Amino acid sequence: METKLKKYITIDSERNLISGLKTKTSHRGGNTVSHFFDNGQLPDSLKNNFFSTLDLQARLSALTNSAMVSRTGDRPQTAMQWMAHSPKIEKELSAVSKSLFGFDLSLCAGAASQMTLHIGDRTDPAPYGGDRSQEYFNAVAKLPTITEEGDGVKCAVGLLAACVSRDAEVYLIDEPDLYLHPPQAYEVGKLIVDILEKRQIFVATHSARFIQGLADAAKDRLVVVRLERDIETASAHVVENDVFTDVKADPILAFTNILEGFFHSQIILCEDEADCLFYRATAHRILGDRAFKNALWLGVNGKSAFKKTAAIAKRMKVPFRVIADFDLLRNADDVAPLLEEHAEVSEFFVSEISWLEGQIQSDGKLNWQLLKENGLRAASHNEATYKRIDKLLRALNDVGIIINRFGEVEHLREPKLPKKGVECIGSMLAENLEDSDEYADLRKFWKELESQAIATPNSLARLFN
């Protein structure tokens, strides 16, 4: 029987042969194939030459002083041994370091038993008789060593040093963004793909910038799997590749942090950043720090942008909620796309909005301007209309479309302050929201949403999947 393991190796159980590796031609032996089929694991002798596991410790240890290769013909095992084996690898790593951090790297591999890696402008080897002469290494040894740098630089250089040697076929990289500034995480993501162009890479990361770097460089090769965990269960969601391209191409989303939503339990969408600030701050002050825990708050830049932003969140496989002013309901085309996964509520919404438009036409005391400013209270003169609108708001609320039943943010204070927008929100947040009579409606608003605000990941999955 012949079994293919991805595209890299062929396992022939009848001849007890594993072949197809670029690092070694084949492995024979009584235990090689049987060990793989019996245990689902490759033996260490093969695994070490096929896989490269680059966790934090491995990346840092790649830069510690390294012994020389003991015998001619022995296969290098460390990043520095590979650089000593091939000056081309050393120069490539230096060029990568220069582009990322602004300094060159040079290997000192002279008569001393330990090799060291140094930072600073590369020394011209010509006056010393070449880049493998003892005089050249003596000059390099005067430069500072890489181990004197901070952990961010060491982690990144250690990772890239392991990659440029290209001594494995599959790379397992854990948290490559550790200690890196966000712009550097993006560049490291791109560099890894460029360096390991024909290798397979598995990465665990908590950096949206790193993922975007991978996406920009890998294009169709990238597969993103978003993991969700709670105490009892874990689930995996495969994300479409083109979501990254679409975010980057959008003139507004490209400059938001929506991709950070990958690492949050949900995304809360508000009309703008000022509304996000108000709702986030007041939820925390009234409901406590459990309110919308681990949620990303994002302003979408206008009511018409809710549907576009929500569509991206869906494709990212991240649950979302919308918190909006009452007049979001005025344009059904802005709301209906948010309800695509809730057919029954969607049909109910379309029917009720059509009815509400008719009521506005026939009721001389009801119009959209009054609804925008006062919310449900604008219909208090007609009990039947009031109850019907209330029923619609509750149906939307149950699927995560939270409409401010008091109208606009500014009307969560009664009486309303004589200010608008950011100035009004700043003044409101400076007041006693927790106890004053002026904010009774605000407290009522959040108390009605308390069960949603402290929803668990499991309950979020039931709401949005």
Image (cartoon, rainbow, N blue to C red):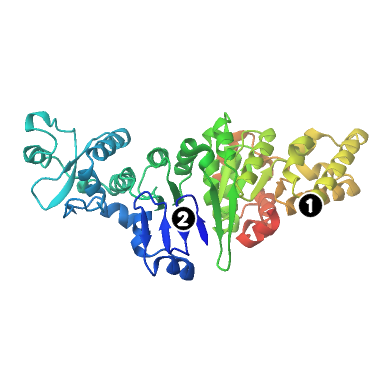
Q: What's the residue at 77%, 39% (across, down)?
A: 329
Quarter the C terminus occupies:
bottom right
Instruction: Give the foreground label among 2 and 1.
Output: 2
Query: Where in the figure is residue 299, as x and y percent of width and height?
Result: 59, 39
User: What is the spatial separation of the Cα atoms under label 2 and label 1, in whole angstroms?
Assistant: 57 Å
| Amino acid on which the number 1 mark rests in the picture | Ala
Q: Is 149 placed left or right of 236 in the picture?
A: left
Q: What's the residue at 57%, 41% (across, down)?
A: 241
Query: Where in the figure is residue 372, as x and y percent of width and height?
Result: 75, 37
To which residue does mark 1 refer?
A: 395
Q: Nearer the viewer, residue 88 or 304?
A: 88
Q: Quadrant of residue 305?
A: top right
**Crowdedness near tag 2: few (<14), some (14–19) or many (≥20) residues, C-alpha within 10 Å:** some
Q: What's the residue at 90%, 38% (across, down)?
A: 359
| Amino acid on which the number 2 mark rests in the picture | Thr
Q: Nearer the viewer, residue 142 or 396?
A: 142
Residue 232 position (above or below residue 453): below
Q: Look at the numbered disc 1 and give the secondary structure of its residue.
A: helix
Residue 249 position (above or below residue 76): above
